[in-house]
């Protein structure tokens, strides 16, 4: 029998190393992929090059719809900003964040799909940025122009939009290995080291000061390649000029004060303490992000993993809005934190956002999107809602530019970057599956041996994940390497089988299982993650039904109507939009007695479709349904287009009807929904 060793690595504890270890890596030459160079903390997980991971199943369909939808055609659908006049193409138009935002999602999509037409759309942006670099290292637009409706033509020198372009360049190098990027970034960072003391991150706008973690991330990435010590000095400068997220999370009162900060800044800034931890090695940076999650849970937090922010922070009433940019930026922050810490908490959190909030905020064909989504969203209409920042009642309808156009530009990074973080190389020369979705990966293990693993699964809807192992070189028959498998914290009875033989070992929720084995061509691993129905409690004591990584919401009929904007609004919001309404009753409560842990799985009955549709993220194709009973509350009615105020939990008793049968489906499959239910 081949050697088979199972070990369990607990999540990275504050101030201690994970199973992979935090150790000095003086020469950084022992692994298959570039880890952190000393004195940076060594990472347990390492991102694979773009192109190493490919989508399958429903995820491939999702990316294909992005290609044929707005991601692949934004230069035509939003030509005023993304067309030839864009300042990042040398034009006299928009010079700020929107162009780089689009490429930040288009580039990884183009290269993971190996789509030449999309790659050709990316190249002019790369080439212009490279060619724009001046002798002193500055790059990008450099001319402020007079205002023009719909365009951002000033603050050309602002540090912030360049940070987005740094992410683009990092990804371009990952996909192509183009060495011009290394020279380009080295010269720019030399320029920053010289200029930042005179012109700090917040000089032109506050965005650079709030979002400096993006800049810092790429500085460390380049240091790992070149070893240039000046980059560590620059890292200290950038951290000191960036808003102090560590202090804000540990000692600040931002989450207990409404309107205390911008919703997207929180999503982007969330990773900064952990990014800087790589250089500081101070445990307080790791503790800060965990403390932030605890504080958010009972103040601004939503069950989707996001928060009330429409656009400034709001307490977590389920009818407050959550901006699309917040979703994709928080996902990216969680991806970076997971790679650096190896802590399963962040993988669980990432799936919560990605598999609930992300699918519902764009249309099925990825041709329109919603600026704010609501956890309890019973109508998507042109009605002025109780948002702190409202854009002429267009925030929850679906369009190309409705609400505000930043999300039109920025939403594209969500799915491609999730794909990029399904699999990681490990510090022990193995491979890790930390986020689950249908995919296949080719990566180096052991001493440079290329292994291919096909992940066959309908996760997050199904509990079974099958991994099929083969070697790129047909001459290779076997290889010893560790396979890391995440066991979600919500899963109590996970099991692992290798070639049908169950692994006899304790596998604990919220930890990483290491399967260390000499693998053969054709080996199969079956990971089973049993899901059970549970209730969690949120704003005002409301109840949320969960199963595995998914939230479940009331299924409602959805009537989509395409309408035309008035002429005077078309320049700001586009020519058309969708409203979504329903003739279904939505004002249901759940009975407290049915939610108790010992009986909930008897009262909430799970039904699964025999097959999962190629595109499962809508009402018609929802692969899982939960049948339950609800109580109608006639006095719970619409208020300003949303579900009106109600005591979600009360001991006094509120008039309710007799029990009715209701059906719940995954949150990500809904547009209209009630997710946080009153309890009676």
Image (spheres, rainbow, N blue to C red):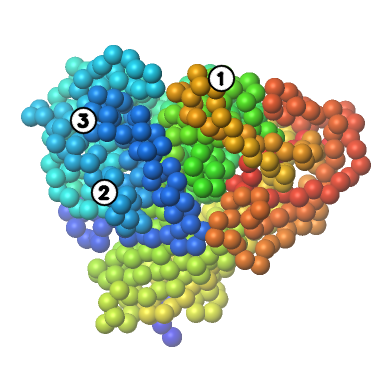
Left or right of residue 329, residue 132 in this image: left
Q: CA distance from mark 1 to mark 3?
A: 33 Å
Q: Is residue 38 visible?
A: no
Quarter of the image containing the C terminus? top right
Left or right of residue 534, residue 391 in this image: left
Query: Mark 1: which secondary structure?
Result: loop
Q: List the residue tagged with mark 3.
A: 90
Residue at 48% across, 34% down: 400
Q: CA distance from mark 1 to mark 2?
A: 37 Å
Extreme residue toward the left, this view? 135
Query: Mark 3: which secondary structure?
Result: loop
User: Reading the chain from its start, which is encountered first: label 2 or label 3?
Assistant: 3
Left or right of residue 423, residue 154 in this image: left
- Position of residue 263 relative to residue 451, above or below, is above
Disc marking residue 392? 1
x then y, percent, for residue 151 = 35, 22
x then y, percent, for residue 342 = 41, 51
Q: List the residue tagged with mark 2.
A: 120
Residue at 55% across, 76% down: 502
Q: CA distance from mark 2 to mark 3?
A: 17 Å
User: Dot 3: within a 10 Å radius of its alpha carbon, few (fewer than 14), some, or many (20 or more) residues?
Assistant: some
Residue at 66% across, 67% down: 610
């Amino acid at each position: 029998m081949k050697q088979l060793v199972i070990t369990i690595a607990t999540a990275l504890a504050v101030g201690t190393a994970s199973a992979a270890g935090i150790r000095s890596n003086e020469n950084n030459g022992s692994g298959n992929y570039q880890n952190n160079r000393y004195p940076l903390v060594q990472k347990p997980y390492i991102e694979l090059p773009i192109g190493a991971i490919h989508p399958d199943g429903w995820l491939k369909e999702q990316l294909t719809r992005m290609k044929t939808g707005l991601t692949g055609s934004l230069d035509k659908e939003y030509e005023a900003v993304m067309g030839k006049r864009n300042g990042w193409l040398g034009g006299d138009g928009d010079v700020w964040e929107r162009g780089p935002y689009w490429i930040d999602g288009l580039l990884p999509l183009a290269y993971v799909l190996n789509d030449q037409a999309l790659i050709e759309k990316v190249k002019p942006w790369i080439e212009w940025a490279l060619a724009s670099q001046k002798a002193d290292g500055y790059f990008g637009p450099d001319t402020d122009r007079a205002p023009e409706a719909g365009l951002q033509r000033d603050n050309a020198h602002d540090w912030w939009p360049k940070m987005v372009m740094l992410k683009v360049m990092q990804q371009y190098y990952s996909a192509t290995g183009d060495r011009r990027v290394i020279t380009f970034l080295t010269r720019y960072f030399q320029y920053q080291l010289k200029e930042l003391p005179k012109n700090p991150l917040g000089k032109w706008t506050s965005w650079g000061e709030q979002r400096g973690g993006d800049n810092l991330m790429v500085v460390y990435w380049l240091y790992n390649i070149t070893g240039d010590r000046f980059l560590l000095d620059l890292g200290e400068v950038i951290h000191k000029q960036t808003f102090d997220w560590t202090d804000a999370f540990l000692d600040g009162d931002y989450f207990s004060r409404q309107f205390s900060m911008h919703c997207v800044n929180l999503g982007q800034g969330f990773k900064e303490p952990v990014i800087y931890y790589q250089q500081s090695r101070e445990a307080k940076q790791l503790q800060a992000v965990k403390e932030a999650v605890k504080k958010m849970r009972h103040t601004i937090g939503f069950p989707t993993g996001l928060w009330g922010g429409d656009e400034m922070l709001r307490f977590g009433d389920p009818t407050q809005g959550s901006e699309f940019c917040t979703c994709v930026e928080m996902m990216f922050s969680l991806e970076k934190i997971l790679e650096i810490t190896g802590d399963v908490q962040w993988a669980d959190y990432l799936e919560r956002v990605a598999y609930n909030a992300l699918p519902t905020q764009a249309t099925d064909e990825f041709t329109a999107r919603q600026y704010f989504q609501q956890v309890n969203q019973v109508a998507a209409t042109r009605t002025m809602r109780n948002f702190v920042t409202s854009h002429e009642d267009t925030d929850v309808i679906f369009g190309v530019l409705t609400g505000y156009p930043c999300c039109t530009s920025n939403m594209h990074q969500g799915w491609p970057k999730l794909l990029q973080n399904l699999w990681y190389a490990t510090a022990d020369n193995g491979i890790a599956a930390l986020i689950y979705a249908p995919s296949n990966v080719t990566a180096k293990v052991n001493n440079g041996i290329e292994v291919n693993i096909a992940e066959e699964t309908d996760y997050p809807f199904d509990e079974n994940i099958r991994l099929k192992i083969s070697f790129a070189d047909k001459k290779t028959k076997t290889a010893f390497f560790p396979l890391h498998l995440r066991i979600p914290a919500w899963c109590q009875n996970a099991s692992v089988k290798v070639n049908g033989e169950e692994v006899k070992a304790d596998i604990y929720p919220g930890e990483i299982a290491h399967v260390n084995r000499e693998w053969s061509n054709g080996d199969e691993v079956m990971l089973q993650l049993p899901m059970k129905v549970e209730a969690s409690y949120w704003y005002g004591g409301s109840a949320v039904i969960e199963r595995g990584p998914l939230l479940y919401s009331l299924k409602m009929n959805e009537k989509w109507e395409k309408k035309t904007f008035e002429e005077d609004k078309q320049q700001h919001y586009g020519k058309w939009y969708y409203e979504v309404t329903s003739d279904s009753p939505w004002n249901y409560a759940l009975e407290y007695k049915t939610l108790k842990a010992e009986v909930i799985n008897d009262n909430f009955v799970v039904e699964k479709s025999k097959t999962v549709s190629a595109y499962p993220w809508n009402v018609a194709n929802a692969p899982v349904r939960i049948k339950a009973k609800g109580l109608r509350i006639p006095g719970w009615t619409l208020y300003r287009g949303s579900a009106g105020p109600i005591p979600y939990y009360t001991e006094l008793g509120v008039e309710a009807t007799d029990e009715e049968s209701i059906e719940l489906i995954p949150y990500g499959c809904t547009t209209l929904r009630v997710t946080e239910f009153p309890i009676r």
